[in-house]
Amino acid sequence: MLMRNQQRNLKSDFVTIVPCVAAICNLTSAAFAQQNKSRTAAIERKYPALADTVERRSVSIWSDGTKMAGDFYLPKDVAADARLPVIVFIAGTGGTKKGTPARMAPVFVKKGYAFFAFDYRGWGESDSKLQLLEALPEPDENGEVTVKARAIRWQMDFADQVEDIRNAIAFVAGEPNVDPNRIGILGTSYGGGLATWIAANDARVRCAAVQVPGMGGGRGPAAERRVLRLQTQQARGEVEPVPFETGAPGGKMSSYAHMRYNSAKGIGYSAIEAAEKITIPMLIIDAENEELMDRTKNGKRVAEILEANGTSVKYHVLEGIAHYGVYGKKFGEATSMEVEWFDQYLSLSSNSSKDDKQ
């Protein structure tokens, strides 16, 4: 299959690679597991039912030359000149716009918000990043090339996903029914750490909420040396430059076998350290029986940092649930708290007060 450049829509998860069997391609079962959730399957997945009063618009967002798929939710009868506060949803491990945010969006829209969800590059319905599998030929007079490349999907990639989030914020800030001075972010799980970093580093965001957040927890000296050694090996081509056959999560996260960790892309990323810079109001919701991480070193630790720095913060533990209970048993309670939090800090009156102080 021929490929002109990264700005073409990808038709499959293997862009220019001829379909083959494992014996020919010499791929492990882990490599095939990475591809068991294709872009086509994501497109074919059904949305949950949408209330008659809510409108959903499909949009495309450019992020560093690759198109991401997004969903923009509004009240169906919104006035042309209305300027609404908007919540940008930041997904967790393997999360896509047709999952949790599709359930949350109507709740926020009915309360007078616009709501925006998207799939990171290489996740869900979004186009893939590309890895060249051969020498790059000389571009033609239009700067175009025909290449053999691998579609890079389902990467846990802090550096690129921070860029994706910022481009999602940039996109929605340009929507005519959005008030760009009233942007909130809502991150869940792995996305809670990303949301924390964004809250510290993107001045467009006025309020944040995170639920069952994974903040990374930091690395010890030995782990840091291992990651730096991995980056050296990737740079020299001694191991896979981008995880494909390697990098699948195990243990408690083994249900995400299609995902790939690339710890080398997380060098210098620390949501805990970023929290020291946060000045906007932040809600942090944890699960009492959190089983995937130590919440005292994640959500609670960030809350302690914000409180010590005098930043408006609310820390709440949902009783009687483990990590995934926030999407089930306690979905309504968590979402109600989040709506209340954004009501407090993204209303026109609170926004005006903040502007007066700047």
Image (cartoon, rainbow, N blue to C red):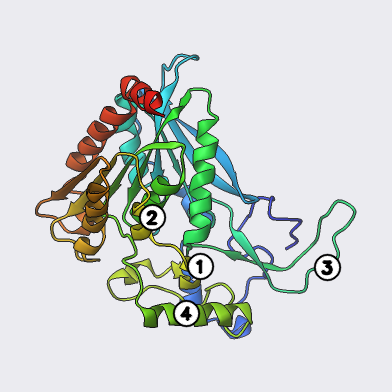
Residue occupying image coordinates x 10% and y 51%: 319
* Mark 4–mark 2 distance (CA, rounded to whole Å): 38 Å
Count of marks placed on residues: 4
> Mark 2 highlights which residue?
274
* Mark 3–mark 1 distance (CA, rounded to whole Å): 27 Å
Question: Considering only vertical position in the picture, is 113 above or below 123?
Answer: above
SS assignment at label 2: helix
* Mark 4–mark 3 distance (CA, rounded to whole Å): 32 Å
Residue 272, quarter of picture: bottom left
* Mark 1–mark 4 distance (CA, rounded to whole Å): 24 Å
Tell me the tag on residue 137: 3
> Mark 4 highlights which residue?
29
Front residue of 170 and 250: 170
Percent x, y of residue 342:
29, 32
Q: Amino acid at mark 2?
A: Ala
Q: Residue furthest left?
A: 320
User: Which of marks 1 and 3 precedes in the sequence?
Assistant: 3
Q: Around disc 3, counting alpha carbons within 10 Å, would you say few (fewer than 14), some (14 to 19), or many (20 or more)?
A: few
Q: Around disc 1, counting alpha carbons within 10 Å, would you say few (fewer than 14), some (14 to 19), or many (20 or more)?
A: some
* Mark 2–mark 3 distance (CA, rounded to whole Å): 41 Å
Q: Is residue 159 left or right of residue 147?
A: left
Q: Amino acid at mark 3?
A: Pro
SS assignment at label 1: helix
Image quarter in which the N terminus is found: bottom right
SS assignment at label 3: loop
Camera-nearest label, 4 or 2 = 2
User: Which of marks 1 and 2 precedes in the sequence?
Assistant: 1
Q: Is residue 227 left or right of residue 276?
A: right
Percent x, y of residue 102:
36, 40
User: Which of marks 4 and 1 precedes in the sequence?
Assistant: 4
Tell me the tag on residue 265: 1
Q: Amino acid at mark 1?
A: Lys
